[in-house]
Image (cartoon, grey):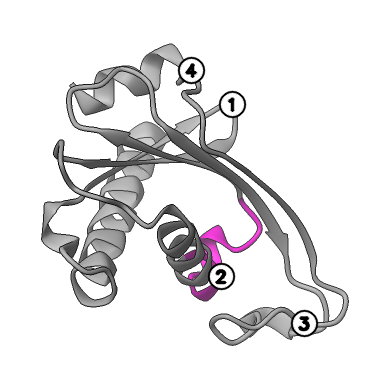
Amino acid sequence: MKVAVQQEDLQLLARTLQEQFLVEVPSGEVFRIKCAVNKDELMILIQHPVGVTADTQQIFALLEEILQSLPNYREQRVQCFIRVSGDKLPYAKHSLAVKPGSWGDSGPPLGIGGEGEQRRICTSLSPVPLPIGFIKLGT
């Protein structure tokens, strides 16, 4: 039962992210988003067709804003990957862990970091291996 509920939550998160991409990202309709959990870490895979130029900084910033606004994912460790559809390896990776500080239960407003908020952000633009179970999601 827990696995089924978790899968529903991940599908809902992927749909939420997809809807935000349609609104916020130029050519947002070409991006496909999938979510998974691996070792208690949320993983988000964003794919796009060959020939589409992705502004990785904008994409990662948007993901961070959305996740901060969702109470269930605010304190979650997150690995974000961007790859071209059909490729096995992503060309960009973003690691994020946001822990709300003085914002209370509601968390910071979108796009605003508060005093006491701790962040660990790492962005890589070279091909990085995906966990084996996650590769299957994109195929």
| Residue 46 x, y percent position in the rendering | 31, 43
- Residue 95 shown left or right of residue 51 in the figure: right
- Residue 111 shown left or right of residue 10 in the figure: right
Which mark lies nearer to you, 3 or 4?
4
Mark 3, residue position: 114
Mark 1, residue position: 39
Mark 2, residue position: 68
- Residue 40 shown left or right of residue 129 in the figure: right
Alpha carbon distance from label 3 to label 4: 33 Å
Alpha carbon distance from label 4 to label 1: 16 Å
Mark 4, residue position: 129
Alpha carbon distance from label 2 to label 4: 26 Å
Does the segment drawn in magenta span residue 8?
no
| Residue 134 x, y percent position in the rendering | 37, 23
Q: Is residue 30 above or below residue 46?
A: below
Q: Which amino acid, by three-letter code, is at mark 2?
A: Gln
Alpha carbon distance from label 2 to label 1: 21 Å
